[in-house]
Image (tube, rainbow, N blue to C red):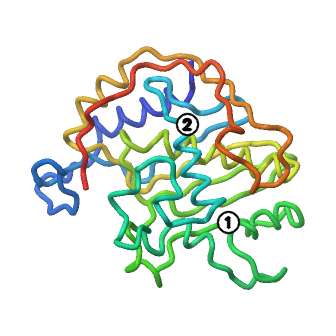
Amino acid sequence: MSKADDLFAAMCRDILDNGYSSQGQEVRAKWADDGAPAHTKKRFGVINRYDLSDEFPALTLRPTPMKNAIDELLWIWQKKSNRVSDLRSHIWDAWAGEDGTIGKAYGYQMARKYRFGQGEMDQVDNVLWQLKHRPASRRILTNLFNFEDLADMGLEPCAYSMTFNVTGDRLNAILNQRSQDVLVANNWNVSQYAVLVHMMAQVSGLKAGELVHVIADAHIYDRHEAIVEELIARPRYEAPVFRMNPEIRDFYDFTPEDFVFEHYQAGPQVAGIPVAV
């Protein structure tokens, strides 16, 4: 059975049984349909570890739309775009301004150039350069949480930092996330950044190792609780076999079509999830 299912179900069970409720507090989020406060149960400092050399961490309790998840990943890390029309899906439409962008968030931050010791480049190119020339470095990371630009972002970044670390011939990484709607976003983010580690490893002559996902505020909304209970009680299946185009050696040559998830069996998709905004 997929180990990602086990981690997801255990995390949800812990939040539902032991989570701190925001009931009685003033909360920012509201339910889109009626404007009522969107309360949550949360656990602080959740850490999940995924051994990418063992299996791809796809949820099988329900399917994760991998092509759309990878498209968003490439939008941020490869295209370095903040324009919603550059995405195949419409997941960012609600956050776009009149100019059609999400402001100075995500891809905008990745495109900003900085002066490094090896010259001027953006954060992604710095990671690629370091992995090639200084793999033993303990300074290989990215950070999207730029305080100077927060007021000009459509949404302050949730998954905001990646720290890469090479151990032997393995590329490991830590994904830091300030906040996560567990039902909606958990495996979307996990799958995206697992793919990213595989991509970075391949173009750097390394193998994918471990992805550690650190979530400061892992929460389940009150109107999602019954959905989560049903979801984690479902049958579980084997993780899919992940394949990536082995010919690609340039990070910027990858497309969503270069990734295949063979034998991906999952339960039915969850429909009608209430939306908190």
Q: Secondary structure at mark 2?
A: helix
Where does residue 193 sit, x and y in percent of width and height? 60, 48
User: Which residue matches tag 1?
Assistant: 141
Q: Amino acid at mark 2?
A: Met
Q: Is residue 131 left or right of residue 18?
A: right
Question: Would residue 265 be found to the left or right of residue 94 on screen?
Answer: right
**Location of the N terminus (image quadrant):** top right
Q: Is residue 77 left or right of residue 254?
A: left
Q: Quadrant of residue 240?
A: top right
| Residue 234 location (% of width, % of height) | 38, 17
Q: Is residue 8 above or below residue 40?
A: above
- Rendered view: 4 above or below 82: above
Q: From the image, which quarter does the C terminus lie in?
A: bottom left
**Which mark, residue 66?**
2
Q: Residue at x 58, y 69 (%)?
A: 143
How far apart are the two marked residues, 1 and 2, measured between alpha carbons? 25 Å
